[in-house]
Amino acid sequence: MQFNEGGQRKRPWLKMRALAFTTASRSNWSTSAAPQITLSAILGGGLGLVAWSPGHTPAFGVLFPLLWIAQPSRVAAFACAAAYHLAVVRFLPGFAANWFDSIVAGFACWQAVGLVSGFAWAVLWPPRGSTVPCVVLSTFSVLVMLLLPPFGAIVPANPVVAWGFLVPGTGWGGVALMILLTCGGAWWLRRRRWGLGVAPQRSSLIILGLLPILVWTIGRVPQQQDGRLAGKALAVQTQFGRFPAYGSLDVMQRLYRMGELAKVQAHGPDTVNAVVFPEGIVGLYDASLQPSIDLELTGPMMSKGQTLVLGADVAIGRNRFHNAALIYRPDGSSTLVVARQTVPVAQWRPWSRGSHFPADWLANSTADIGGGVRARFILCHEEWMAGLHLLSELRESHELVIAMANLWAAEDATASYVQGTHTQGMALLFGRKYVRAVNGRQVPS
């Protein structure tokens, strides 16, 4: 018989039993958790595909916070959120690969979005057994956090966008309704102790089954012609391909083609008051380009009383640029509105000695486009950012939303559709008319 130094008898069988119990627990956890995590990822990815695909209503996105709160663990919540957002931006690997000329970079960018999105939702997921105030506070906090930097500039498909397709025209009341019903729904699910792997009560099952049907019935489905014409503002769609090199013949050719498009699509002096071209359509702007712009665009358009809006990069210092909308009014006045946030890493990179587009979320985003109409401008990457949409609605008076995008790197129309639904959802929520001008991949002449 063995004794320890204190004279007590050793019990090696206790240690062996504890070790066996620990090993079995880990084994049971791994075998039970893996299917749950897989199921969570499948459900999250499936919802992302259903909500953000042509022919469906993005209003299905209002259900994601409820799916998130129903997860059995923080790891499952991460898997569900990451899969959901990866499904939303499923086109990103090809887009980023074309932008950076690297397939590896394309998949790295896609995975980075998934990791950041998953982390944002998982870090505030309330554990099982949390008190009611904890559940409500966690749900409210994640909704707010996703509007603010840095997550607001990276995580797509903010729930408030989906609510625009469900309750259009409700404005700030709709935002409050989103917060109230989302937090209330999270509380209700936790109060019922329902989640993945837990059998719901019959009444709960009926309610949960009716929610998707209700969303499908009420939610608005985006149409292909949406955003082309609003009032007397026209958005011109182009397929010119990547940004033209500074000083190249391609710039002159583009201006000529843009002039022809404006003549055809904005014919007649009383048909259209403002013609909008895509973001960055003429590449880098400087004063030497102005005579050609006057010859091909502003001259003919001013004679018809039309305002010209076109996208360009404007140098503000050595290797520092603004992504801007240049606005030329028929009275001869002009102004510009600059992007408040460009694409992280691709354009916004303050650490780089190369080109950099500074960010300023509080910069002005509205301008007069003639005819007594004041418009709010959203430039490309800003379309994804619900926080910037809400900032403009809070701070600046306007009647029209003008979105300008350049998606030359996109391999199909999915990227433009998903990005455009973000602007459309926010415009619908606040009852704003909107137009959206997009440049796509180059089509051979």
Image (cartoon, grey):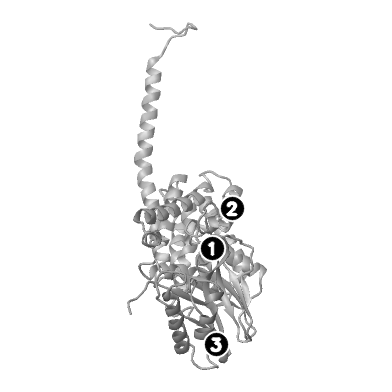
Q: Nearer the viewer, residue 65 or 394?
A: 394
What SS does tag 1 mark?
A: loop
Q: Looking at the figure, which quarter contains the C terminus?
A: bottom left
Q: CA distance from mark 1 to mark 3?
A: 35 Å
Q: Is residue 172 visible?
A: no
Q: Amino acid at mark 2?
A: Ser
Q: Nearer the viewer, residue 335 or 119?
A: 335
Q: Is residue 288 visible?
A: yes
Q: CA distance from mark 2 to mark 3?
A: 52 Å
Q: Amino acid at mark 1?
A: Met
What SS does tag 3 mark?
A: helix
> Which residue carries the number 1 mark?
385
Disc on the earlier residue, 1 or 3: 3
- Name the spot of residue 2 as percent of width and height, x first: 40, 7
Q: Which mark is residue 141?
A: 2
Assess whether mark 3 and mark 1 are in contact (beta carbons under 8 angstroms).
Answer: no
> Which residue carries the number 3 mark?
299
